[in-house]
């Protein structure tokens, strides 16, 4: 059983996508570079795959024509070093770091100054062009009208279809895959479950069968991810309780081995240590940036503290810290 006590940015987005309807309630309407743009919120759900007239599980427009995602024919893992898992998280972290502005052009100028801190030099030019289109995409999303009734699956489907059309307007097939495809499949599953829950004509047995069918329509990879995310959330909640209680290693191991088994308990203990080390390095890097600002020295420290893979997660992790610190009750 693969369990982690902390979530990488990609896992965070996967978990958020599994409860995606909530984005229509708490979308980034106040996030840097968004709040002052045209009215409207946007979320992270798309239409269920079984809904007639909407796009299929690969992403299809409401007219039934294949989207850019389908036209690409790309069903394999991307080989492009830019279009990798976590790309959207990196772009969001980049926007967050760029700060508040009501002018997209100003935001793009800030992105140009920051792009080298988030992407290697060999990818910087392409990454900046993609980031600029991502800004335009979010401006266009801001012009969409949010559903009036967030409990109405049909209204949500219409809104998600409108959002999908904006996505394929700004991104080609491979880009769509990297930014949205994984999330979209879980979104459809979430909305399918919402449909079942709001259908009064279903008996308890029919409702159970419909939910099982929605589960079966997920790809094996998404089912595995969903199961792992559920386990991850449970383990993370348990670990958070341990941390609040200042539980010692013996208490943690006893509870974990009873719930997950000896092997998982030992693995979670190692992850406790890794997480503590990760947070300490984040603290060191954050303090250095506060004291000396961005520059060559900070970049050198970043390379010393973090592996190449970890460097892709640093900015998202620090952005998440900011969000948590700003959250009510924090």
Image (cartoon, helix red, strand yellow):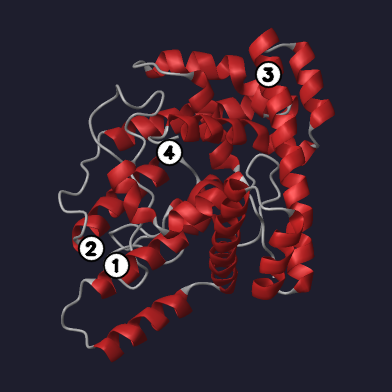
Q: Quick check: 125 left or right of 299?
A: left
Q: Which circle, 4 or 1, is nearer the viewer?
A: 1
Residue 265 percent location from the top left of the image: 74, 66
Q: Which circle, 1 or 3, is nearer the viewer?
A: 3
Q: What secondary structure is found at the residue carrying circle 1? A: helix
User: Residue beneath label 1, please?
Assistant: 194
Q: Which circle, 3 or 4, is nearer the viewer?
A: 3
Q: What secondary structure is found at the residue carrying circle 3? A: helix
On screen, 16 above or below 109?
below
- From mark 2 to mark 4, how far is it between C-alphas? 26 Å
In the rendering, which numbered label is found on residue 153?
Answer: 2
Pointer 4 or 1: first along the chain: 4
Q: Quick check: 329 left or right of 126?
A: left
Give the crowd class for mark 3: few <14, some 14-19, many >=20 residues within 10 Å: few
Hey, which residue is sitting farthest right in the picture? 304
Hey, which residue is sitting farthest top in the picture? 292
User: Residue beneath label 3, please?
Assistant: 287
Residues 71 and 179: in front is 179
Image quarter (top left, top right, bottom left or bottom right) of the C terminus: top left
Whether residue 183 can be seen here: yes
Residues 229 and 97: in front is 229
User: Residue beneath label 4, please?
Assistant: 170
On screen, 84 above or below 64?
above
Pointer 2 or 4: first along the chain: 2
Q: Residue at x 38, y 60 (%)?
A: 60
Pointer 1 or 3: first along the chain: 1
Residue 95 percent location from the top left of the image: 49, 26
């Amino acid at each position: 059983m693969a369990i982690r006590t902390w979530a990488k940015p990609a896992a965070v987005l996967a978990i958020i996508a599994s409860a995606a309807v909530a984005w229509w309630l708490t979308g980034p309407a106040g996030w840097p570079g968004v709040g002052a743009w045209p009215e409207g919120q946007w979320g992270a759900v798309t239409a269920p795959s079984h809904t007639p007239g909407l796009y299929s599980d690969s992403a299809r427009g409401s007219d039934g024509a294949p989207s850019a995602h389908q036209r690409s024919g790309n069903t394999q893992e991307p080989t492009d070093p830019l279009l990798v898992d976590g790309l959207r998280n990196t772009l969001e972290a980049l926007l967050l770091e760029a700060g508040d502005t009501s002018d997209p052009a100003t935001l793009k100028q800030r992105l140009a100054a920051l792009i080298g801190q988030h992407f290697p030099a060999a990818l910087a030019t392409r990454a900046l062009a993609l980031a600029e289109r991502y800004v335009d995409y979010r401006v266009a999303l801001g012009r969409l009208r949010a559903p009036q009734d967030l409990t109405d699956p049909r209204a949500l489907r219409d809104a998600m279809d409108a959002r999908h059309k904006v996505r394929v307007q700004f991104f080609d097939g491979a880009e769509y895959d990297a930014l949205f495809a994984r999330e979209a499949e879980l979104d459809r599953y979430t909305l399918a479950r919402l449909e079942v829950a709001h259908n009064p004509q279903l008996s308890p047995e029919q409702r159970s069968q419909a939910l099982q069918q929605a589960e079966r329509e997920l790809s094996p990879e998404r089912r595995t991810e969903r199961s792992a995310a559920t386990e991850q959330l449970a383990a993370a909640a348990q670990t958070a309780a341990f941390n609040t209680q200042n539980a010692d290693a013996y208490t943690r191991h006893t509870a974990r081995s009873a719930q997950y088994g000896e092997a998982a308990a030992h693995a979670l203990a190692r992850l406790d240590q890794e997480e503590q080390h990760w947070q300490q390095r984040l603290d060191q890097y954050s303090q250095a940036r506060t004291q000396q600002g961005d520059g060559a020295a900070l970049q050198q420290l970043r390379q010393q503290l973090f592996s190449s893979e970890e460097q892709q997660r640093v900015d998202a992790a620090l952005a998440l810290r900011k969000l948590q610190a700003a959250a009510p009750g924090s």
